[in-house]
Image (cartoon, coloured by chain):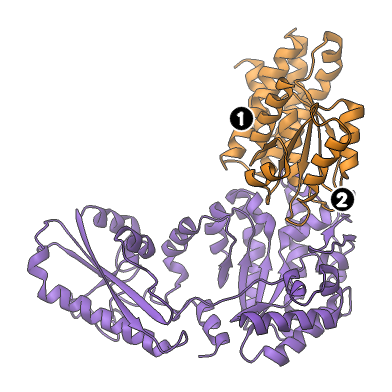
Chain colours: A purple, B orange
Amino acid sequence: MTQKELLFSALRHETTPRAPWVPFADVHAGKLIGADAQQVLTDEDTLLKALLEVNRLYKPDGQPVVFDLQLEAEILGCELAWAADGPPSVASHPLADTMTVPCLCTLPKPEQGRLPLVLNVMRKMKELVGETTALYGLICGPFTLASHLRGNDLFMDMYDDEDYVHDLLNYCTQCGKAMSDMFLEAGMDVIAVVDPLVSQISSSHFEEFLAEPYTELFAHIRSKNAFNSFFVCGDATRNIEVMCKTAPDSISVDENVDILAAKNITDLLCESNSCGMYGKSWMCPPYIGEIETLIQQAKEYQYILVYQIIGQLEDSYDFEGMMETGKAMTALAGAVREKMASCFGADALYLAAGGCGICSRCAKLDDQPCRFPQKALASLEAYGIDVSSLAAAANMKYINGSDTVTYFAAVLFHEKEV
Amino acid sequence: MSVLTEISENLQKGKAKIVKQLVQQAIDEGIPVKQILDEGLLSGMSVIGEKFKNNEVFVPEVLVAACAMNMGAALLKPLMAQEGVEAAGKVCIGTVKGDLHDIGKNLVKMMMEGKGLEVVDLGTDVSPEAYIDAAQNQGCQVICCSALFTTTMGVMEEVVKAAETAGIRDKVKIMVGGAPVTQDFCEKIGADKYTPDAATAADAAVELCKAI
């Protein structure tokens, strides 16, 4: 598995031996070679040299090629104010005094603005490091782009003229598609739709104005056989769920988001099928039962025995080693259930990592009843248990050193007989 | 429901036209101007501020509420001057030099107006000298600096120094805020007050104006 494939595997929601690494070096890339922000964002050779230095230094699994949310805005008529040590800012809003939606004929074309520079660098990066590094093309999200064009009045328009906002956002969505197409053509593997302003509105405003544009945009990118990611800045915790519902391949957040709360949401969204097991086993959702009911059941137990198995991997790409450890955990959990049943009582609940795994193919797939109801194991996650919090509560380590993989399992029981 | 409660509730929903009608109605009923302001407009804005602080409402909701407040306040302004109602204090606010981001700055301004302060808006890309000029020549008791970038927040230190150089450091309080700004940073540059959100900033400014 190459570094790039590791990231793709994560974007396909498969379990990976380790978390992929996508360092966000934007104008910082220039800093590495002594170039300022304006140089790195306006000079092709400087940008390429800086990005190659990022690649050499950080050995990323994935890497953004250019991070400038003003790229589209500049083409669409916003004046930019440049700075030496930060990305440029939008200094004027062409639609500030005119409530109009530009003609679709104005959508960015490859020869406009700084696109020739950006597209060239994308092609060169593809050629030079694209074999092992997944490349991200970043586009400005529809809401932020609309605010670049219209200015802060956009927020008021959301109350005063909803239809206008819908129309303007549709234009910005079409712009996003056009940008995605150009970036994909230039060799990008992942399109990141970056919309910092999403953290500044309520979930109901997101659903009213942004759910459709985003669903459309991600579907478009997927139809081009490329991956996508929904980038947001700031505390967007409350909006993670509505963002997930637009079906991106992944969500990217910063440190302002409550990561545990966000994980709870993505874990509960089993329909998003992040582990690939949804609907494939009697012991996984939706057949295992309603999450709320399962959480309630788990809460009724007084005691829990948590145990773990740590597998040594050859390196962080050792997928086979990871799967081996997973099988070892299933075997161990089976043995605990079989040989220690008398310790926990008849009504104990046995949970393991990542679902059942007793049969290689669950009978459910053939519409048959469970073959081994006495052995079948549900996952900790199916019962709404956050495994990293569980590990911390049990004073155990979730991560046990480099090139290792750790699986957890647990027995929930009433009588303390062990 | 009293007309003042109605003003407050409609303001919270951002119903600018209704707020304007109700304020006129309150004036016609002979309710004292100060009472209409405090118990109608400012009380509504205060609820919005609290909800914003608690992540219950967001930028658009605050903006429409502030718009409604301004519509109502416009009717009260000439009457307030006549009756000699004074502002709770005078503040100047701006986004620092090199930074054009004004959503946060605007929210703080609206919340401050919602607390009955008079606010001089210096806009964006504001030089340290412009803050000092506003404090000296327009009698602002508090200078508020906003920045969105780690690369521009350094200008806040220059504002503090410029106030020292101008010899007004003991006459004016300097507040700082914005995404990258922290309490530590505020202390390090010798500013007087950091607040993490717009509603808290408005409360702090009122306190600072009282203290001066």
- Which residue carries the number 2 mark? A96
Q: Amino acid at mark 2?
A: Ala
Determine whether B105 is above or below A94 in the image: above
Residue B73 in the image: state x and y as whole percent: 79, 23
Q: Residue furthest left?
A: A342
Task: Residue at 72%, 47% (x, y): give it.
Answer: A158
Q: Is residue A270 left or right of residue A413?
A: right
Q: Amino acid at mark 1?
A: Val
Tag 2's secondary structure?
loop
Q: Chain of mark 1?
A: B
Task: Residue at 87%, 55% (x, y): give it.
Answer: A91
Determine whether B63 is above or below A296 in the image: above
Q: Is residue B129 left or right of residue A22?
A: right
Q: Is residue A235 left or right of residue A298?
A: right
Q: Is residue A338 visible?
A: yes
Gap between marks 1 and 2, in whole Å? Answer: 30 Å
- Which residue carries the number 1 mark? B47
Quarter of the rendering containing residue A39:
bottom right
Task: Residue at 73%, 49% (x, y): give it.
Answer: A162
Q: Is residue A385 visible?
A: no
Q: Is residue A386 left or right of residue A225?
A: left
